[in-house]
Amino acid sequence: MDKVDCIVVGAGVVGLAVAAKLAEAGQEVVVLEQHDLIGSETSSRNSEVIHAGIYYPTGSLKAKLCVAGKRLLYAHCETYHVPFRQCGKMIVAAREDQRATVMAYIDKAKANDVNDLHWIDADAVAEQEPEVQAVGAVVSPSTGIIDSHAYMLSLQGILEQHGGMIAFDTRVDQIESAPAPVVHTEAMSLQADWVINSAGLWAPELARNSPGAPTGHYAKGHYYAYSGPQPFSRLVYPVAEQGGLGVHVTLDLAGQVKFGPDVRWIDGVDYTFDESHFADFVAAIRAYYPNLDPNRLHPSYTGIRPKISAEGQPAADFMLQMPTHHDQPGRINLLGIESPGLTASLAIANAVTAEVLK
């Protein structure tokens, strides 16, 4: 049986970041990807936002890795000429009864070492974003947007420059643990000193024989594109909701506005665009953008969050399951890597690389 230093399962943004960092550190790295392209699922079906690190519980992995990852990601974009824009965002209090909730984000962010948030009143909101209706807003200057595909291509380039490779159309069926990790696919079995399970939506299933691995759950979100003149110059977010950050305004680097995502819990992976909740979508947007023209909304795409908490449960933290957590040498499971996974990707990669090299 062939053997390599490291196998990474999944060529999404986190898997590619991990693989690139390991290859840079001198490891022989093979990435196994079930599709024929990098970033074919969660990594290409999201808001492409570089998050500041505002919402997450202080001390959580989401908070720590998002804040560290944001700094690493902006530096990476500069170094590797990945298109991005630090456009900032507003978190709006659309009604007076939301004011305290939104203002509390300032202290929450400070506890996470994000110190640049500030409150603006209704007049300042109207001056900066005339189409937004709000009694006030918190502004996050360090939030940005990124060309996520260009970012993933840069990671693939680093991986391959340092001798790593990606095997496409290679679905992993099982990971065995003893005496050393072995990955089984339909066509082959491959042994490694380390196997990093970064399979996103499929990671909990591949971790099913790891003690303490949680059950996976799926939360689907829909995005609508907005045609015609673009009404916003930055990201605009409402108050966060259960399971997500609310139906918000996101921009791409060409200035195209999209609204989304909503949160719909589903039983399996299904990217079908369901317009049956269109009226709810419109109502959510009109709460802060009353001049919305629903006729300019057009279905764009859906994405699915790889959750490890079920509907109605408190949101779970990232789980970086190291060998000390499950007593399986050489196995690392990256579980529940939903938002802010893109922002945190390089920080996650650093944590994994440190574990492999220690």
Image: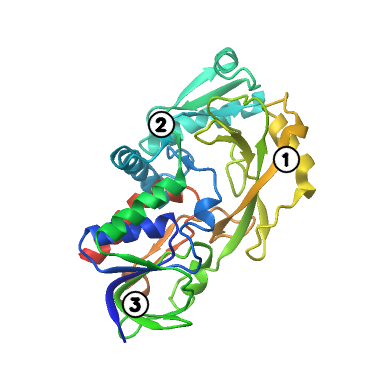
User: In the image, which disc is placed on residue 328?
Assistant: 3
Residue 210 is situated, as x and y percent measured from the top left of the image, at 43, 76
User: Disc 1 marks which residue?
Assistant: 281
> Mark 3 against mark 1, which lies toward the viewer?
1
Q: What residue do we see at 73% from left, 23% from top?
A: 291
Where 161 falls versus 229 (above or below)? below
Q: Please name the amino acid that badge 2 sits on.
A: Ser
| Disc 2 to disc 1, C-alpha distance | 27 Å
How many marks the image carries: the answer is 3
Residue 247 visible in the current orientation: no
Tell me whether circle 2 and circle 1 mark residues in contact (CB < 8 Å): no
Is 343 left, or right, of 245 in this rendering?
A: left
Tell me whether circle 3 and circle 2 mark residues in contact (CB < 8 Å): no
Q: Please name the amino acid that badge 3 sits on.
A: Gln
Q: For mark 1, does the 10 Å Cα neighbourhood hold few (<14), some (14 to 19), or many (20 or more) residues?
A: many
Q: Secondary structure at mark 2?
A: loop
User: In the image, which disc is placed on residue 142?
Assistant: 2
Q: Please name the amino acid that badge 1 sits on.
A: Phe
